[in-house]
Amino acid sequence: MVNSLRYQNHSHIYGINVAAPLHNQKGETLGAISITQQDVSKAQETYWLVIYLSRVLDNLYLDANQPHYEEKVKKIIDLLPIGITYLNDNNGDIHYNEKFSVLTELSQGKEPSKQRTRQFLVSTTLSKETRPKIEGLFTFKDIIGNCQSLDDAKEIGKRVAETSVPVLIYGENGTGKEMFAQAIHENSPRREKPFIAINCGAIPAELVESELFGYEEGSFTGALKGGKIGKIEAANEGTLFLDEIESMPVQDQIKLLRVLSTGKVQRIGSTKEISVDTRIISATKKDLLEESDKGFFREDLYFRISTFIIELPPLRERDEDIMILAEEFATKFSRKYNMGYNVEMEPDFKEALKNYSWRGNVRELEHAMERAIILLDKDTKLKVEHLPKRIKENYNKYLAQGIVGDVLYQWDKKSEQGLLAMAEVMIIEHVLKITGGNVSAAAEKLGITRRTIYNKLQEFPELRTVR
C-alpha cells in the first residue's frame, strides 16, 4: 500500500501493488514482476494476472535459447490487454500490440479509425470472457494474394464457413492462420456471435484447463469469487480459435474431445454439465499425426478437429504475391506514419524482396516494410539499405552468385583477358552501382583504398559511366 506519510502527494495515486518472483532454470530468483493500480476492488484479479505473467516469463526464460523464442514473446504481447512494446537489442526489431498503437494515436491527438477505437474501448470495459462479438474482424477480402493455392484455400474456407463442422488450419508461422479463422467466422451464420482466440502455446500448461473450461468458486486455492467462465463457454454460439493446438496438454485434449463429442462442458470443481454450441477452429504448424505417433497428441482428437483441413501456403511459394503484399504494406505504413506522399521502391529493393526466402512469411514481410518506411527519408525511394540486415545479406549473396556467372560467361567469350582481372572489374562495377557511385562507400565495402578504385576508373573507362 502507498503510505501518504512517506511519499509526495503527487505520488499518492495508487492503491495496491502485487508482485511475483521470476526464476531461472535452477529455480533461483532473478527479479520480480509487479503491477500497481488504484482500484483496490480488483486486487484478486490483479493477483492472478501477475501470477500468470510470472509463470509465462519463467517459461520464456527456459526457452530463451530455443528456436522461435522471439515469436513466442510477440504472441504473448499480442494477448495482453494493455498497451505494450517490445524492443530486441540484438537485431533492433520493434514489436507492439494493437492496444499500444491505439494509445499512441490518442496521445498524439490523432483520431484512430472507428474500428480500432471500438476494439480498444470494448476490450477495456468488458472482460475477455463476456464481451460480445465486435466489428473489425478480417474477412476473405482482406486476405491478399493471387496465387492458386491461396485462392483454393479461400474457396474451401468460404464453403466450410456455411457449416459448423470443425476446421483444422495448417500453416507455418506468419501465414495468417488466425486471420483465416476470423474470415471463416465472419462468413458464417455465427458472425454476430463471439469470436474468441486462444494460443495454447503461450499459456502455461497448468493454466490451460482453467482458461478453456473455467472453474467454480472455491475449486482451488486462489480461485476467484464467483468462479470464472471458460473460453469454450464464452464462445457459445460463436467460434473458438485454438492456435498452436499441438501445445495443448494431453489431459486437456481428453476434456476437449468430450466437449466435441457431447456438446457439453464441465467447469473445474463442478459436477454440472453445461450445454454449449461452440464451433472449434484449430491451427497448427506441425503434422499432428506425427505428434500422435510420438505420444504428444491424441489421434482420436485429431480426427474430431480435422473434418475439414485447410493448408495455407508459405510466402516463398507465392512469388507473385510478394510485391502485391509489399505494395499494400507500403501504403498501410506510409499512411500510419503520415508520410504525405506515395512511397516508391527502387528496383534493387524489389529484387531483394523477391529473392528472400521469408521464413517468417507474411508477418516477416510486414515487419520489414514497416521498418523500411520508418527509416525512409522524405522524398526518397525505398532502397536495399532500408531493409533488415538478414535480407540485405541474402540479396548481396544473390548478386554475388550472379556476378560469378556473368564473369564466367564473359571470360568464355574473351578468354584473352585474365579471369581474376575481369572478376575484379565486375565486382567493383557492382559495388559502385549499389553505393550510387560513391567511391568512399564502395572502397569501404570492398576493403580497399579509394586510390585503388580511382586507378581502376582510369584503367577501365566503362566503370566511369556507373558513377
Image (cartoon, rainbow, N blue to C red):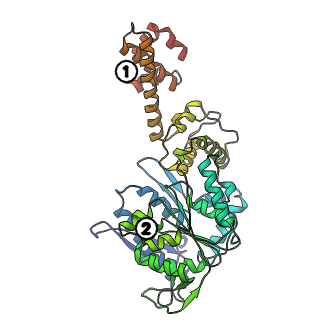
Could you tell which of marks 2 and 1 lies nearer the N-terminus?
2
Label 1 secondary element? loop
Q: Is residue 462 left or right of residue 189?
A: left
389 relative to 39, above or below: above
Q: Is residue 128 left or right of residue 248?
A: right
**Amino acid type shown at disc 1:** Ile
Task: State the residue position of label 1.
Answer: 448
Q: Position of residue 101 (x, y in %)?
A: 60, 58
Q: Which mark is residue 127?
A: none
In which image quadrant can residue 6 be found?
A: bottom left
The residue sitting at 68% across, 69% down in the picture is: 134
Q: Of tags 2 and 1, which is closer to the observer?
A: 2
Q: Could you tell me if residue 5 is visible in this image? A: no
Label 2 secondary element? helix
Which quadrant does the C terminus fall into?
top right
Distance, label 2 to label 1, CA atoms, is: 53 Å
Q: Position of residue 44 (x, y in %)?
A: 49, 82
174 relative to 29, above or below: above
Task: State the residue position of label 2.
Answer: 247
Front-lying residue, 347 or 162: 162
Please identify the residue farthest to the bottom as the structure is shown.
Answer: 271
Front-lying residue, 248 or 125: 248
